[in-house]
Image (cartoon, rainbow, N blue to C red):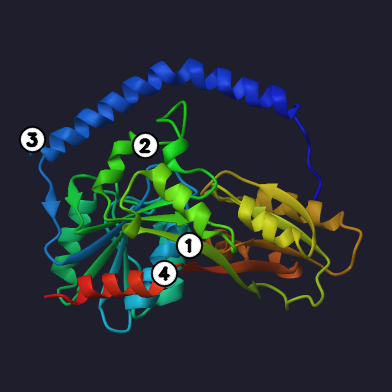
Amino acid sequence: MKTITICNGYNYIWNMHQLRLFLLPISWIYGLITFIRNKLFDVGFFKQYSIPKKSICVGNLAIGGTGKSPHVNYLVNLLKESTKITILSRGYGRKTRGFILADNLSTGSSIGDEPKMYFNRFNPSVQVVVCEKRAEGVKKINKILPDNELIILDDAFQHRAVKAEVNLLITDYASLFSSDYVLPAGNLREWKIGKNRADYIIVSKCPSKITEEAKEIISKQLKFNSAKIFFSTIKYGALIPFTSTLETNIEAILLVTGIANPKPLIQELEKKHTLKTVEFPDHHNYTISDIERIHQIFDTFAVKNKAIVTTEKDFMRFSEMIETTKMNKYPWIYQSIEIEIDRKDIFNKEIKEYVNTI
């Protein structure tokens, strides 16, 4: 894969260090504001709505890119056969507002790419709802879906106005919250002490052969009950075509992403393919001109066995544009992924016991 170097590594690291030092006073102010806000919730000055039925929140301390969605998928697959589940999300990046119960007419634009992905995967056995005000969303779910038994909240760890019974905190193996700073000097939404609201911490995107020694070191860095820390790895599934038939013996891939951290996928595809990447911002709303640009880049490939690959979340937005663009003339594919959790027997048992306890 071609890489364009903007500056040498030493200067880049030094410049980032200087920028962090410059922004630290702002981070202290921001961190103090979030700390006071959390304390006001803790002491009851700000009211919390406790979800009356079973509830699990999947969240993080950092902004984006930790892999919350695959862990939501994992929970749903674990519980859907025995439990009536509703997934509640803000629907980040959607062009609508308010409460929406996803249906067959919902699109990535109307409910957000992640909720659309959940709907496509789990409909009709699981309901998907979007509402930026989570407490309002929970109340409406209980009203219109009275038989629902479990609400899984996607990315609601900082939404203190609603209180889930179980909180799963996800942190990226390559960017642990224990080594990060509060915004804007770093990527944390609040100070690291926020981890104490979590019931479990899952270290995501770990190497497939992570050692027990590495796990022990990370557990010490996180300063959390090691029995409640789990480690997950990405398991890459099939390449699934969504326009023309799947090319065989693919040699070259143009990878198109609009996610926070495409690096793990890049590393995976580089193992077997010549790779070129086109990266857009997280939750990017693709346009016809974006599609045309992508096709122009793809046409410059000198090999025959080639394809355009994107993520499953990006596919939710691209799928709306197939009929209005020339996408059908190109081999578009999305990469399916799942996760595997170490000590999964323990993790699964504890989650099931919580959900099934009356």
Q: Say which amino acid is labelled 1.
A: Ser
CB under 8 Å between discs 2 and 4: no
Q: Say which amino acid is labelled 3.
A: Phe
**Mark positioned earlier in the residue sequence (3 or 1):** 3
**Mark positioned earlier in the residue sequence (2 or 3):** 3
Nearer mark to the viewer, of 1 and 4: 4
Q: Which residue is mark 2?
A: 189
Q: Say which amino acid is labelled 2.
A: Arg
> Farthest right residue?
302
What x and y, as percent, mark residue 18? 57, 17
Mark carried by residue 45: 3
Q: Is residue 330 left or right of residue 140?
A: right
Q: CA distance from mark 2 to mark 4?
A: 29 Å
**Mark positioned earlier in the residue sequence (2 or 4):** 2
Q: Say which amino acid is labelled 4.
A: Arg
Q: CA distance from mark 2 to mark 3?
A: 21 Å
Q: Which residue is mark 4?
A: 343
What x and y, as percent, mark residue 196? 26, 45
Nearer mark to the viewer, of 1 and 2: 1
